[in-house]
Image (tube, rainbow, N blue to C red):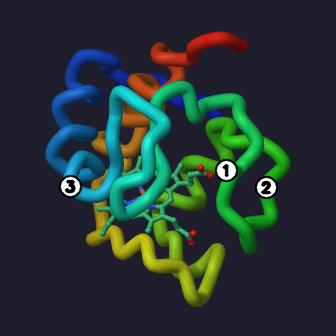
Amino acid sequence: MATEGDIKRGGIVASVRCGPCHHLNSNYMKVGPGLLGIYGKKPSISGVPFDVWDDDALQAWLINPRQIKANTRMLLPAMSEHDRNDIIAWLKARVVNQ
Ligand code: HEC
């Protein structure tokens, strides 16, 4: 599944939708783990069936975390495909120290 997203818009949407629970500019824990450089990394959380946070894994996770991991504490209100694609494009653009 190819993701074509708007990086700049993705950053804004991420601040609103992910910022309350995640640090976006560090790896420090907030409610969930920090998201800096998460794209392309191995999940740090347990109970998800992914080897790496790539487009497909992030799409599935952001569509419905509960469907991937029944007891996850990540509660994410439904989001449009447009928002998802932009957030993933933004996460991808922020890969560091790979
Ligand atoms: C209500 C709080 C909340 C919101 C909002 C939220 N998350 Fe999370 N997120 C969490 C928690 C808690 C975890 C850890 C889940 C677990 O261990 O099951 C998590 C885990 C993750 C992980 C796995 C991180 C890792 O190190 O493996 C990713 C990726 C992620 N969230 C992305 C996002 C994105 C992108 C958004 C915004 C669209 C978002 N989250 C919104 C709470 C939240």
Q: Are marks 1 and 2 in contact (CB under 8 Å)?
A: yes
Query: Which residue sits at x=67%, y=42%?
Result: 53
Q: Quadrant of residue 14?
A: top left
What SS does tag 3 mark? loop
User: What is the crowding at mark 1: few (fewer than 14 residues within 10 Å), some, or many (at least 20)?
Assistant: some
Callout in the foreground (3, 1): 3
Query: Which residue sits at x=21%, y=24%?
Result: 9
Residue type at numbered disc 2:
Phe
Callout in the foreground (3, 2): 3
Residue 44 position within the rendered picture, expressed as x and y whole percent measured from the top left: 68, 52
Residue at which label 1 appears: 57
Q: Tell me: is circle 3 under 8 Å from ligand 1.
A: yes
The numbered mark at residue 20 is: 3
The single residue placed furthest to the bottom in the displayed view is: 71
What SS does tag 1 mark? helix
Mark 3 / mark 1, whichever is N-terminal: 3
User: What is the crowding at mark 3: few (fewer than 14 residues within 10 Å), some, or many (at least 20)?
Assistant: few
Query: Which residue sits at x=53%, y=22%?
Result: 92
Residue type at numbered disc 1:
Ala
Say which of 33 and 40 sits in front: 33
Image vertical order of residue 27 relative to residue 32, above or below: above
Residue 15 position within the rendered picture, expressed as x and y whole percent measured from the top left: 20, 39
Q: Quadrant of residue 6?
A: top left
Query: Which residue sits at x=37%, y=35%?
Result: 87
Cα separation between marks 1 and 2: 6 Å
Q: Quadrant of residue 98?
A: top right
Residue at which label 2 appears: 50
